Amino acid sequence: MAIIPFDQRDGWIWYNGEIVPWKDAKIHVLTHGLHYGSCVFEGERAYGGQIFKTTEHSIRFRKSAEIMDFEIPYSVEELNAAKDKVVELNGGGDQYVRPVAWRGSEMMAVSAQHNKIHVAIATWAWPSMFDPETKMKGIKLDIADYRRPDPQCAPVHAKAAGLYMICTISKHRAEKKGYADAMMLDWQGRVAECTGANIFFTKDGALHTPLADCFLNGITRQTVIALAKENGIEVIERRIMPEEMTGFDECFIVGSAAEVTPVAEVGPYRFTPGNISRTLMDAYTNAVRPKSKAA
């Protein structure tokens, strides 16, 4: 079945404080965010009509803009309310939520001190892609050629559109070779993350994950670390060299889109999805689902 292009869908989008029909949410081709990457965004999930960690995402959204030297002209509370409204208008249930902010068209050069900051929020249906048993088979990852940059060379702690250029290239290359995604190293050759998700490994019952000092400290990453500790699993955040993957037992990736997805291969390294992956996958599924109110 053909996928409907995103600019041809029906629904509602929140655009600069107004609810507009989906197909009317447009920008001019001479937009600074399009040419110079002055754009930040979030990726969130609504489950049963409720957005998971909505406030944390709104706070990060505003912080990303601050790192990119502009200010989102809406408060966290206003953003939360707008997201809830769009989820409701687009049918509730399980949805993906995409807030985005960018510099407009007033100036078209590297400098854009006086450009208007535009904000939009779109949502669309996004049910769980795989059942637990299918996920437990594990996906296969390539090892990307591009690396996560030195924090002194890029705004690595912002969820900025420009940082995803090398992610798209790396994922395309991986898919062409038959992989689901690619794992990226950092600029010093250490394990970093995947193109749109953080990565974890297990060894001797403990969880190991790279320090998030040159890439985004994902909200799902933070959630999974908390869930691991609640389940009595030791969490070790440290530098990980790629050759260490030989000694790890399990591997999984986490993100708003990926949720908790076990991994069977990373390049030449093999893993067997097991009890820790299953425990955290189930714990995360339970955490994101709205709790029914007592009668």
Image (spheres, helix red, strand yellow):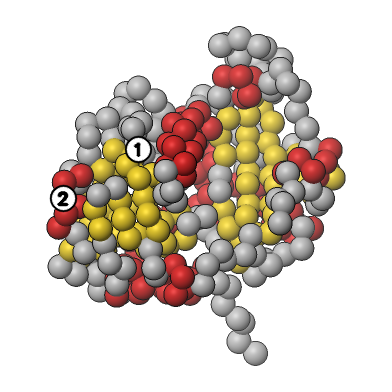
- Residue under the image location 44 percent in, 31 percent down: 166
Does the image show residue 1?
yes
Left or right: 257 in relation to 115: left
The tag earlier along the polypeptide, 1 or 2, is 1
Left or right: 238 in relation to 98: left
Could you tell me the amino acid type at mark 1? Ala
- Residue under the image location 39 percent in, 70 percent down: 136
Q: Residue furthest bottom?
A: 295
Say if 251 sits above or below 210 in the image. below
- Residue under the image location 63 percent in, 44 percent down: 99
Q: Which mark is residue 244?
A: 2
Q: Which mark is residue 144?
A: 1
Nearest to the observer: residue 167 or residue 155 = 167
Are there few (<14), some (14-19), or many (20+) residues within 10 Å of tag 1? many
Using the rendered view, name the quadrant where residue 29 is placed. top right
Instruction: Classify the position of the N terminus by image quarter.
Output: bottom right
Nearest to the observer: residue 45 or residue 174 = 174
Left or right: 24 in relation to 179: right
Q: Residue furthest front?
A: 177
